Amino acid sequence: MILQQYANPARFNRLADRLMPYLAWPAGLLMAAGLYFGLFDSPPDYQQGETVRIMYIHVPSAIMAEGIFVLMAVASAVGLIWRHPLAHLSAQAAAPVGAGFTFLCLFTGSLWGKPMWGTWWVWDARLTSVLILFFLYLGYIALKDAFDDPARGEKAAAILALVGSVNVPIIKFSVDWWNTLHQPPSLGVTKVAIHSSILLPLLLMAAAFGFYFGAILLIRMKALMLARRARGMAMAQAAGRPAAGQEARG
Amino acid sequence: MGGHAAFIWPVYGMAAVVLGGFLFVSLRSLRAREREVDALEKTSPRRGGGNSS
């Protein structure tokens, strides 16, 4: 399996260092372009007026919030089934960032809801299911550290990620299954109900958020790998023997 | 901003705080772990106990 070769920390570090410029630079450039078009070069919406500019942060945050949880569920499945050492690590590195995007989605939605719906919050299906997603992220983060044995913690958290992933399609289809204040999706595989002048900054920001997440994920995975290594070395030192994998640093 | 600046700018401000915050915290954590491993490597006996054969 080709992924197995990147279980070696030195190899993973080399790959991460090679990938980093291809993630960080596009993230910065796309974000700058998205902000320019979103704030200065796109017209107000004919119905929502200037508040449409909230969408350029809100929708990409929502995409990331759901996408990162799916990624965590897939990584958790890989970790549980094939025991790939980087699988649980990638899910753990992604979880706080996913929680951050979910918070951003809820916060921006609230600020969009007040002028559009006349309320900061309503317990409708879409908003409530996203709030549950936020709690699932927090639960995952808390659960992985809740055991003395880290392996048990990561296994329990992985199961939560797998079970919790059922919430993602509920979020997606909540606006179709229930009567909600939230509007149905304007972007789909077969339909685009947004004018190109508004679509452009939205896509730029969504792409920027995606590249940003990729870069942050690699940084956080490297830090977690080093933390594991430091823990192993400290335990080895305490036991009075050379640390395993000491030569593996890239 | 059509009278909606009080709703729009906090959105961009919070996005900057969250995205910038994660970047800052993640980089700081990486540097701290690198320093920790370097310090442990300096005090840890090498594998093979210096036997070059």
Image (tube, rainbow, N blue to C red):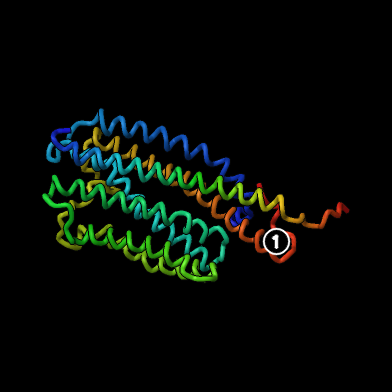
Q: Position of residue A82 (x, y in %)?
A: 55, 66
Label 1: which residue?
A237
Image location of residue A199, percent across then percent down: 27, 38
Which of the 4 image quarters holds residue A162?
Answer: bottom left
Residue B39 versus residue A249: which sits nearer the camera? Answer: B39
Q: What quarter of the picture does the N terminus of chain A occupy?
A: bottom right
Q: Which quadrant holds residue A121?
A: bottom left
Mark 1 residue type: Gln
Question: Left or right of A122: which side holds A211?
Answer: right
Observer-nearest residue: A191 or B26?
A: B26
Label 1 Cα neighbours within 10 Å, binned few <14 / some 14-19 / many ≥20: some
Quick one: SS at disc 1? helix
Report if residue A1 is visible in the image: no
Q: Residue at the spot x=13%, y=45% of the render?
A: A115
Q: In the rendered structure, the residue with mark 1 lies on which chain? A: A
Which percent across, then down, holds residue A205? 34, 39
Q: Image point 23% across, 31% down: which residue?
A: A42
**As drawn, which residue projects farthest toward the right?**
B53
The residue lying furthest to the top in this view is: A41
Can I make out residue B5 in this image?
yes
Q: Nearer the viewer, residue A77 or B5?
A: B5
Above or below, A5 against A27 in this view is below
Horizontal and vertical percent position of residue A152 = 52, 71
What residue is rendered at 48% in x and 44% in y? A215
